[in-house]
Image (cartoon, grey):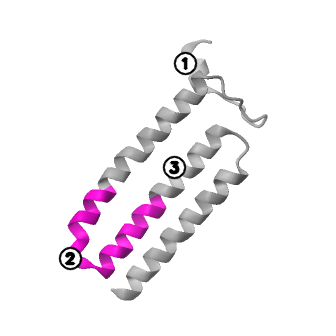
Amino acid sequence: MDIVGGLLLVGGAAFLLFGGLGLVRMPDVFNRIQAGTKATTLGTLLGLAGIACLQPDWALKLFLIGLFILFTNPISSQVLARAAHRSGARKSALTAVDRLEEDHGA
């Protein structure tokens, strides 16, 4: 279990690193929100699973923390993206489709 826990922790750290790189490299706020949210959600869940393998007594608490993260991270990113869209945040020139704008007919 120590090896599995260590591998999960390394995998989680790698996703968190790639999420940080995505925050720097993405062209606009909407892509940054997506890169940050997806990578931090998966990276944190892998890290929690790795800790649960290393400390089985903490598994229930870590599972509850993981559920909280699984529900709150996507919701918070959706709210941030919607607020950025409403405030008129600049989109990248590579953005071809804006479904939210199409839905509201603006």
Q: Where does label 1 land, which residue? A: 103
Task: Give residue 53's position: percent from left, percent from top.
Answer: 31, 78
Question: How far apart, in angstroms, are the residues tagged by discs 1 and 2?
Answer: 48 Å
Q: Quadrant of residue 18?
A: bottom right
Q: Where does label 3 land, which residue? A: 37
Type of amino acid under label 1: Asp
Type of amino acid under label 2: Asp
Q: Where does label 2 land, which residue? A: 57
Question: Closer to the camera: disc 3 or disc 1?
Answer: 3
Q: What stretch is highlighted in magenta?
A: 42-66
Dot 3 or dot 1: first in sequence order is 3
Mark 2 surroundings within 10 Å by alpha-carbon count, few (fewer than 14), some (14 through 19), many (20 or more)? few
Label 1 secondary element: helix
Task: Give residue 11's position: percent from left, percent from top.
Answer: 50, 72
Q: Which residue is at 46% across, 60% downward?
A: 42
Q: Which residue is at 32% across, 81% downward?
A: 54
With 79 as the anchor, is 90 left or right in this view?
Answer: right
Question: Closer to the camera: disc 1 or disc 2?
Answer: 2
Label 2 secondary element: helix
Question: How far apart, in angstroms, are the residues tagged by discs 3 and 1?
Answer: 24 Å
Task: Give residue 24's position: percent from left, percent from top.
Answer: 70, 53
Question: How far apart, in angstroms, are the residues tagged by discs 2 and 3?
Answer: 28 Å
